[in-house]
Image (spheres, grey):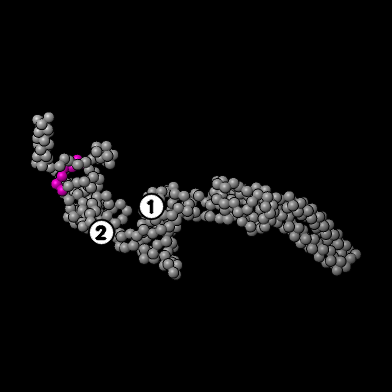
Amino acid sequence: MIKNFTAGILVLLTSLSVYAVQGPPPANVNVSKAQQTTLAPTAWVTGTVVSRNNTELASEVSGRLTFIADLGSQLQAGDVVAKLDDSILKLDLAEAQANVNNEKAKVKFEKAEVTRKKSLLARKLISDTELEETQSNYEKAKATLAAAKARLAQINKNIAYSEVKAPFSGMVTERLSNLGEYVNSGNAIVKLVETANVEASLHAPLTAYKYLKTNQSLDIKSPLGTATAPVKSIIPVADARSHLMEIRLDMQKVDWPIGLNIKAAVANGESKSVIAVPRDALVLRRNATSVFRVGTDNIAEQVNVKIGVAAGGLVEIIGDISEGDQVVIRGAERLRPGQPVNIKGNNQQLISSK
């Protein structure tokens, strides 16, 4: 037993001696090249995903509700959202149509009377006054017919209004009235939200105005992840108290729900040319910040740097790092200066090799 113990000690001491001579074993790392690029200082501003159209639909006539679309219904423009009882309106329609027919008969009669009176006047059988009176009656009949037709058209329109239709494609998100309820003209019935045209509404300092352009892509983040979205419009009018202006982003290609709170990186300073590396390359310690550079001999060299402008996933570094230098972006936490490395092609290779 003593011999076996002694042999084990000898093996351990031999291994330690070899380790001391050869140094630590190669570490598996991923690398990325430092690049010369243009960055601008940014600030994260808050905002919300909104719909371009968010409308409470109301009836233009009064009546009892006989149909309301269900919550969550996805409607196309022109689809019926709600319907009111139109039975009374149809009775009014029948009465109005009868009035029109009656007035048409009067107009026909008065027109014939004018023709007859003109013939009598030509034979000097009546006076000019009688003809003028008949012509006046004819004009009055035509005016009354026009009023009856207008009344008929209004009732037809009211019957059409008894069906509340979607002015745009969207989703019913709230029912503001109940089935069977009597609603007056102007009462809101449902809330319809356009889900196809989604935007983000941000509020940024006025100082960012000179650094923003339409169609410029901004980095955005939310509890659902990260993405980029182009600037759709800039409204350079600030609130008197907050001094914040509104920015609208086009969110068509980002599948985030309406109402979600988001943040966006907005430039707030002049852009400049810098040496930048991915944020993951930074090794942060209490007293210093550094990166590990890998040379052609695959030896890790620790280089102290200072952090400058950051934008997106890149950060400016100030120090002895040049464009094209390979810096470690995965596996730097356990590296030691002078340690050899194995450069892996992607993160999965690094994970599977550990």
Mark 1: few/some/many CA within 10 Å (<14, 14-19, 20+): some
Please say if 2 is above or below 222. above
Foreground of the two, 316 or 161: 316
Name the residue carrying label 1: 221
Q: CA distance from mark 2 to mark 1?
A: 22 Å
Q: Which mark is residue 308?
A: 2
Q: Residue at x 56, y 49 (%)?
A: 172
| 269 left or right, relative to 96 | left
- Report which quarter residue 109 is drawn in: bottom right
Type of amino acid at the residue the image marks with label 2: Gly
In the rendered structure, which disc, 2 or 1, sits on the residue that comes first in sequence? 1
Count of marks, rendered view: 2
Foreground of the two, 243 or 107: 243
Across and down, in percent, residue 128 comes to: 85, 68
Q: Residue at x 33, y 59 (%)?
A: 42
Residue farthest toward the bottom in the current orientation of the protein: 240
Which image quarter holds the C terminus? Answer: top left
